[in-house]
Amino acid sequence: MDIMLTISYSLKIPNDEFFCSETGYVKEEMQEQLKKLFPNEMILTENAVAKREHLIHFPLYENKNSMRCVSCGKWLYMPNKEHLQVSLEYCKVVKGIPLCPSCAWELELDLKNEEFVRELKEKRYKDSENTI
């Protein structure tokens, strides 16, 4: 049986430190660091070998082509905004609050409480002020 375990890291790094300006590819020294941190193959048990697969996402610009879930902070794709060729979950906006599908489902009953909705909206605006 094949199981895919996905682990994501969101890096805040200047574009010119990660990508080569001439070629547009990931810099060699950055590739070496990634190989050290994330080896091509890991042996979990005698019968389980994990091989590395990776995706590099285009820069995410909050409010332009993506949002963060107010509840869990996960990056989300906004289908009605600029097209992104990435494998992000879609953003589900509930009562003006961006949520990932999981949080929207988990918070479905709580979102009927207007006080809870108000607190989430305040959290969203407070978080957006801290990232500017």
Image (tube, helix red, strand yellow):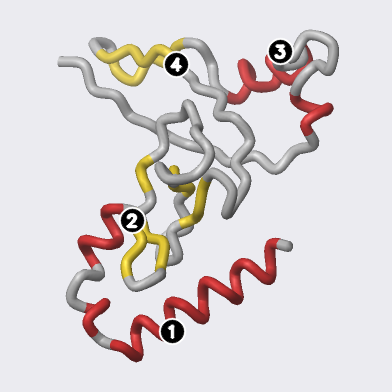
Mark toward the viewer: 4 or 1: 1
Q: Is residue 70 above or below residue 2?
A: below
Q: Nearer the viewer, residue 80 or 117?
A: 80
| Label 2 to label 1: alpha-carbon separation | 18 Å
Image location of residue 93, percent across then percent down: 36, 61
**Residue identifier under label 4:** 53
Of the numbered discs 2 and 4, the one sitting upstream in the chain is 4
Q: Residue at x 41, y 37 (%)?
A: 88
Q: Is residue 72 above or below residue 41?
A: below
| Label 3 to label 4: alpha-carbon separation | 17 Å
| Label 4 to label 1: alpha-carbon separation | 39 Å
| Label 1 to label 3: alpha-carbon separation | 42 Å
Could you tell whether 13 is left or right of 1 in the image? Answer: right
Q: Nearer the viewer, residue 104 or 38?
A: 104
- Which quadrant would residue 42 be assigned to in this image? top left
Could you tell whether 78 is left or right of 5 in the image? Answer: right
Mark toward the viewer: 2 or 3: 2
| Label 2 to label 3: alpha-carbon separation | 33 Å
Image location of residue 122, percent across then percent down: 51, 81
